[in-house]
Amino acid sequence: MSAAPHRPVVIIGAGPVGVTAALLLARHGVRSLLLERHPDVYPLPRAVVVDDEVHRVLQSVGVHEQFAAIARPAPGLRLLDARRRVISEFPRSMHGLHGFPQLSMFSQPELERLLRGALARHPECELWSGVEVVSVTGSGTPHTGTPGDPTGPVRVTFRRGGSDKEEHLWADAVLGCDGAGSLTRDAIGAAWEDLHFQESWRVIDVRTSLPVRTWEGAEQICCPTRPATFMRIGEDRYRWEFRLAGDQNLEGPDGWERLRELVAPWVELPASRSADFEVIRQAQYTFRARLADRWRKGRVFLLGDAAHLTPPFVGQGLCSGLRDANNLTWKLARVLRQGAPEELLDTYERERKPHARHLIRVAVAVGWAMTGGQDRGAAIRRALVGTACRIPGVTEAVSRDLSPALAAGPLVRRRPGPAGRALAGTFCPQPWIRHDGGRVRLDDAVRDAFVVLTAVPPTARMTAVATALGARTVHVDDLDDDGMLAAWLARGRADAVLLRPDRVVMDTVPAGTGDFTGTAAWALLLHTGRRRPDAPAVPPPRSTTP
């Protein structure tokens, strides 16, 4: 074991999820090594949508301004019938809760290059490209033949550049960001749970200077015979997705004519192929709805498509993966760097899996509304969807539900009564604030720390909680934020909140109570023992609660 090199964290897969995880770990002082089988960024576009919550994650790794320069905010999503009449519309704000447009279109290779550029600026991160991982063993994974130590080192076996020679390294933790065909998922003995959606679609990415009829947002064509998705993702870049029969090939001598027919509602193509309409890529994809039955074994974790597969109809596939990284990395850093108990890592799957399941079900429901069969009942169901979406407030509620509050658990304390329920598990808004003589976004001022955000003078016990966690105490009146945070606390009937490093509300001080009263489960999980010399000490939970 001593002959092989060691890394604190090995990340398998250097796509957006893996690189974002490495950058988030670096912010917490944790070194990582990424192993990627491709020699460079995969050049063809795949994901094209992120929401404002994920844009905020990109802010935390320092690429949000560069991303805004290559992204295109969009006004929302429309469901259309076969004649392209609007059934319902889901508007998206240009300035969401997290401080960014609620819907942004982009090209994934461009985002990946931004993330890799940031990676190169962090000495804590190392990337080995052209490396094929062969096996992951140890830390309780089944290939060892013994139960193993769940906190012990993990052995990663790999080959470089197509060589047959196997090499090894050891890691304190392994993050499997290696996609739908994940080797890591097999290594921990996880299996797929089928959530009952599987369809084959043709995805077509185009660059064109021809006039395209579009409302600038995403369109979902709800048609049982030819459902489709359309969106503009750049100045001259567009994406179409069609569910096609197996014999409807868009390549070969008749492919152009079939393509002309498919895109005719949006753009008129000439009879012969034209340089004004460049097909960058067309590929057949099978859209699936699946969820891994386990996301962790010992110190080996699944993230992104290795843990869940989401049909693309609400644009949440990549978003879910980046949420995984944002949820796990601060917890892993606290365990590795400050000696927090291993049970803290159990909250990753407990929090993220129900959230991912919810989004998959929403995507399946939209896919069902788009396709829905050809029987009489399908037409009635689509009509009911349209009627429901015309009820005031329904479309706004559906949009909010794309990222519901985390369920109550050890790191989300939902107190009895309305004053304890409204904010717990939700995200703190991110306004612009005045800080150190300048104007910055909230997260840039508080960085990755725990934060006690209060609208009242902090009490002794509030200060004790902040001191125990190494948290910053911030009074909303000192932020000069036009009252956004004060109003948010007032709506939630809270005098103060305790924010986690991922900006989720972990606990509240209900209005009029003055304290984080009662024993909280998070106190035990966040208690630290072994720690780095410069880390703040966190005393046992007894001193953080009354």
Image (spheres, rainbow, N blue to C red):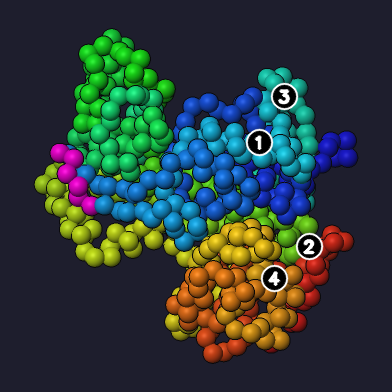
Q: Quadrant of the C terminus?
A: bottom right
Q: Nearer the viewer, residue 83 or 208?
A: 208
* Residue 232 figure quarter: top left
The numbered mark at residue 160 is: 3
Q: Which badge, 3 or 2, is on the more N-terminal residue?
A: 3
Residue at image mark 2: 339
Q: Report the disc number at residue 117.
A: 1
Q: Is residue 171 left or right of residue 39?
A: right
Q: CA distance from mark 2 to mark 1?
A: 31 Å
Q: CA distance from mark 4 to mark 3?
A: 45 Å
Residue at left offset 73%, top offset 81%: 464
Circle 1: element type: helix
**Rendered position, 501 above or below 208:** below
Left or right: 139 in relation to 207: right
Are circles 2 and 1 on residues that touch, CB within 8 Å? no
Q: Give the number of the disc on residue 472.
A: 4
Counting residues from the start of the chain, the first of labels 4 and 2 encountered is 2
Q: Position of residue 336 (x, y in %)?
A: 76, 56
Q: Which mark is residue 50?
A: none
Q: Which residues are magenta?
A: 83-88
Q: Residue at x 64, y 36 (%)?
A: 116
Q: Is residue 466 magenta?
A: no
Tell me the amino acid under the disc marked 1.
Gly
The tag earlier along the polypeptide, 2 or 1, is 1
Secondary structure category for the residue under label 2? loop
